[in-house]
Image (cartoon, rainbow, N blue to C red):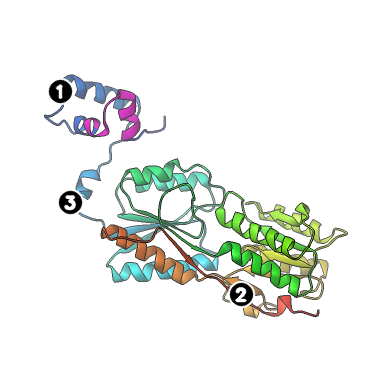
Amino acid sequence: MKPVNLKELARELNLSVSTVSRALRDSWEISTPTKQRVSDLARKMNFQPNPYASSLRKRHSRTIALVIPEIANNFFALAIKGIETVAREKGYHVLIYLTNEEVEEEIAIANSLQSGRVDGVIMSLCGSMQDTEHLLELQQRNLPLVFFDRVSETVAAPKVITNDYESGFIATEHLFHAGCRRIAHLTMSMDLSISQRRQQGYTDALTRYELSIHPERVIHSGRDESNTYQRIKALFLSEERPDGVFASVEKLAVLVYHICRELQLKIPDDIKVISFSNLLTASLLNPSLTTIAQPAYEMGREAAAILFRRLEKKTSEDRVMLPAALEVRQSTRAGS
């Protein structure tokens, strides 16, 4: 049976959370019959008390949690550096948790963090997150939460993002000016607001330049990389092969390079490629990759700074947007 939290226990008993909490602590303020009711239902519902809660009222762990979907992505590697820089300045440690794009893993991590082992949480959501109950429970435990990059628009917590819509528009516009007229978009799960904003920028740019919108040119990648590879390959083998590709994440751009090599398609002569990426090796690829580079380090620093302002009971911004930058290289060379 799944453990319940204090709020659910109180709801079942039709008592206040504070009354249930005092009853479980055997407070003299609560009558014996009420204590017995609470104790009986707690056992029946598999309620697990938080052993750290009372101690956390008096002291801090001097530790914050960072929850991210992956570490291989250069964006997250740079963001970690920004977060750890601020944490060290404040005398805090950073515990890094990887969800590996697994919803169940993100929920399990969020539940474990309710134990009181950290003072606050910085989080970038996994790719298929729709349920936010585990995030709301963190807040109910008065655990400060800050989102960055992959954020939840339904949870009232500070967010640090980049200008995804404008960048999606600029990336598509850049391909148009480079001579592309059949532009494909490779993106992540549409559960993520960043995917929605980047795709909307792509669609609006096509409309602005009077290019036809073809749904088959939009590929939403899943966790099965081999399946994504085959779908992109099939698109490149179609009669109306794209002459430009806008990838929303760097790993999809890397797949394009592999597929073009397999099919003996030349970048940028046959297909031009642009991608959101913080790859340090983007300039070393053959040809060098044109990128929309997010200010990853600065986003990490800002997310950590907001979290510590919350911990220090100071006012902080609810939403910070930092601009990404277009880095033009050989993969979108015009006139090819």
Mark 1, residues whose alpha carbon is within 10 Å: few (<14), some, or many (≥20)?
few
The location of residue 113, given as percent across then percent down, is: 36, 48
The location of residue 86, given as percent across then percent down, is: 34, 69
- The residue lying furthest to the right in this view is 239
Q: Which residues are magenta?
A: 6-20
Judged from the image, the secondary structure of the residue bearing numbered disc 2 is: strand
Quadrant in which residue 59 is drawn: bottom left
Mark 3, residues whose alpha carbon is within 10 Å: few (<14), some, or many (≥20)?
few
Q: Label 3 amino acid?
A: Lys
Q: CA distance from mark 2 to mark 1?
A: 67 Å
Left or right of residue 155, residue 256 in this image:
right
Q: Would you say residue 324 sits in the magenta stretch? A: no
Q: CA distance from mark 3 to mark 2?
A: 48 Å
Q: CA distance from mark 3 to mark 1?
A: 27 Å
Say which mark, if any, is on residue 58.
3
Left or right of residue 134, residue 195 in this image:
right
Image height check: is 136 above or below 205? above
Mark 2, residues whose alpha carbon is within 10 Å: few (<14), some, or many (≥20)?
some
- Name the residue carrying label 1: 31
User: Which residue is painted at 49% across and 50% down in the image?
Assistant: 153
Judged from the image, the secondary structure of the residue bearing numbered disc 3 is: loop
- Name the residue carrying label 2: 326
Quadrant location of the N terminus in the rendered image: top left
